[in-house]
Image (tube, rainbow, N blue to C red):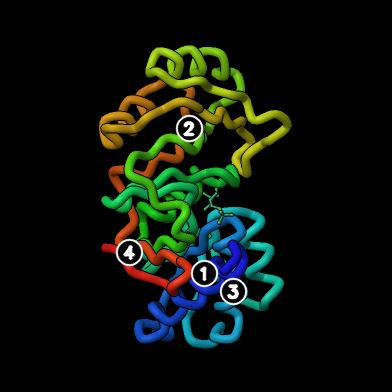
Amino acid sequence: MNSDAKKQAVAAAALDYLKPHLENDTVIGIGTGSTANCFIDALAPVRGRFAVTVASSEASAERLKSHGIPVQSLTSVDRVDFYVDGADQANSALQLIKGGGGALTREKIVAAVAREFICIADDSKLVHTLGEFPLPVEVIPMARSHVARCLVSLGGEPVYRDGFVTDNGNIILDVHRLSIAQPLALEEAINNITGVVCHGLFAHRPADVLLLAGDAGVRELR
Ligand code: 5RP
């Protein structure tokens, strides 16, 4: 199975996972990226079976609306029942690196609110130790040099994502050469750097379920 086929297979599996739980008032959080896009496309035919979606990026909101799927802001719903999103890397504790697409801050917020976070990915994303994928850090523009120095002191090599502005008007530093043996501690350490808005290490709020597509089909990790 090629990469696109795996994304479509895992998106379909996520929909199968959700279907028995869909009610008229269900609120679904929607992630960002190519795998999340497959899920949005899979969701379109059942758009009458839940209440509304909350999108983690402007791009996902546009794609949802193009399918006629209702989108509301997070502030206008009182809960998020499910959050479905991809990842750049996952470990066996379902801790994640996210933000390759730069939407990490809104993704982390929607994941924090969600009752259940269903992560969808192909099996190449499952690793023993997180960090080979550069960790995206969203930074207030004026703090770029300060935050970069702090990230170096934590052992990383931050690289400015040239020409990229987040939906929140900030910049991204992608931190290379981290071997994340202690995800919880590193998440806290980066959170404590002044000027960091958010970063893509999802350790304190891992996924609840990881659906992984491989050549033999989709398997479920908890
Ligand atoms: C975007 C993300 C994506 O979930 C992550 O980059 C995976 O993307 P894709 O499904 O395209 O591989 O965190 O900010």
Whichever of labels 4 and 1 marks the residue nearer the N terminus, that label is: 1
SS state under label 3: loop
SS state under label 2: strand
Tags 2 and 3 in contact by the CB under 8 Å rule? no
- Residue 192 location (% of width, % of height): 35, 24
In this rendering, the label closer to the viewer, 4 or 1: 4
- Residue 132 location (% of width, % of height): 46, 35
- Residue 86 location (% of width, % of height): 49, 57
Indicate which disc residue 197 carries.
2
Name above or below for residue 168 compared with residue 126.
Answer: above
Whichever of labels 4 and 2 marks the residue nearer the N terminus, that label is: 2
Q: Residues within 10 Å of mark 3 (few under 14, many from 20)?
A: some
Q: Is residue 52 left or right of residue 218?
A: right
Q: Nearer the viewer, residue 159 or 53?
A: 159
Figure quadrant of the C terminus? bottom left
Q: CA distance from mark 2 to mark 1?
A: 24 Å
Q: Which residue is mark 1?
A: 53
**What amino acid is labelled 2 in the image?**
Val
**What amino acid is labelled 1 in the image?**
Thr
- Residue 52 location (% of width, % of height): 51, 74
Whichever of labels 2 and 1 marks the residue nearer the N terminus, that label is: 1
In this rendering, the label closer to the viewer, 4 or 3: 4
Q: Residue at x 61, y 59 (%)?
A: 34
Can the viewer see residue 39?
A: yes
Q: Residues within 10 Å of mark 4 (few under 14, many from 20)?
A: some
